[in-house]
Image (cartoon, grey):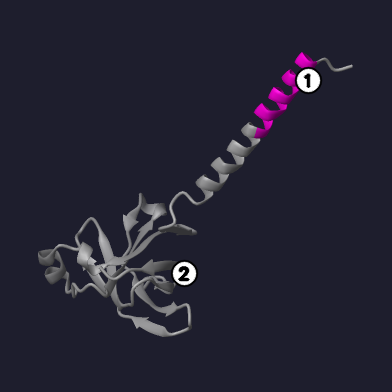
Amino acid sequence: MLTPNLYRRKCITLSFWLLSALTSLISIAVYANENPNLTVLDNWEIHHIAFPSTFIQPATAKAVGIDRRGNNGVINISVLDTDMSKKPMNIAVSGYAQNLVGHRKELDFKQVDEGDAIYYLAQIRHSNEETFRFFIRLTDPKTGIAKSFQFQQKMWVD
């Protein structure tokens, strides 16, 4: 027979275990999605992001050939070789963006080589709160190895 005190202790113990299990599941989910701007394909660590061109300082934008406008976004891709102490890779980048109604826009990537970092930048004109799915293809010109990935980003007019 359960006394009220014993019943209360069992409920507290069960609540503790349920809370622990829920916390563990949340931790696993957060860890799995720790960085939505990172994709790892074999030994390639790919960093990718899309953001408003107005986030770039005017002098920097001019130096790398970016048109700063409220309705222009920038796609930034960088690839690191995890087999070589995360050395930046000189790679061919191509791709396109497709909005949610299916309109496709080709992306023209420019390489920015800063010695210890290599970036690939492309621009995209967009409407306010327009969501794009970016389809990116990377090709290593030395080996011919090609890898593809995609990511999605909502863009705002700044």
Residue occupying image coordinates x 35% and y 74%: 93
Mark 1 closeness class: few <14, some 14–19, many ≥20 residues within 10 Å:
few
Which badge, 2 or 1, is on the more N-terminal residue?
A: 1
Position of residue 6 relative to residue 57, above or below, is: above
Q: Is mark 2 on a helix, strand or loop?
A: strand
Q: Find residue 150 and name its label.
A: 2
Question: Percent x, y for residue 123?
Answer: 28, 75
The answer to whether residue 14 is left or right of residue 77 is: right
Residue occupying image coordinates x 16% and y 68%: 61
Main secondary structure of the magenta stretch: helix
Mark 2 closeness class: few <14, some 14–19, many ≥20 residues within 10 Å:
some
Question: Percent x, y for residue 66?
Answer: 19, 73
Question: Percent x, y for residue 14?
Answer: 72, 28
Residue closer to the observer: 41 or 154: 154
Q: Find residue 7 and name its label.
A: 1
Tell me if I can see residue 109 in this picture. no
Magenta stretch bounds? 4-18
| Distance between the alpha carbons at the discs numbered 2 and 1 | 52 Å
Question: Is 119 included in the stretch rendered in magenta?
Answer: no
Residue type, numbered disc 1: Tyr
Position of residue 84 relative to residue 132, above or below, is: above
- Quadrant that contains the N terminus: top right
Residue occupying image coordinates x 20% and y 74%: 69
Residue type, numbered disc 2: Gln
Name the image quarter holding residue 91. bottom left
Residue closer to the observer: 147 or 140: 147
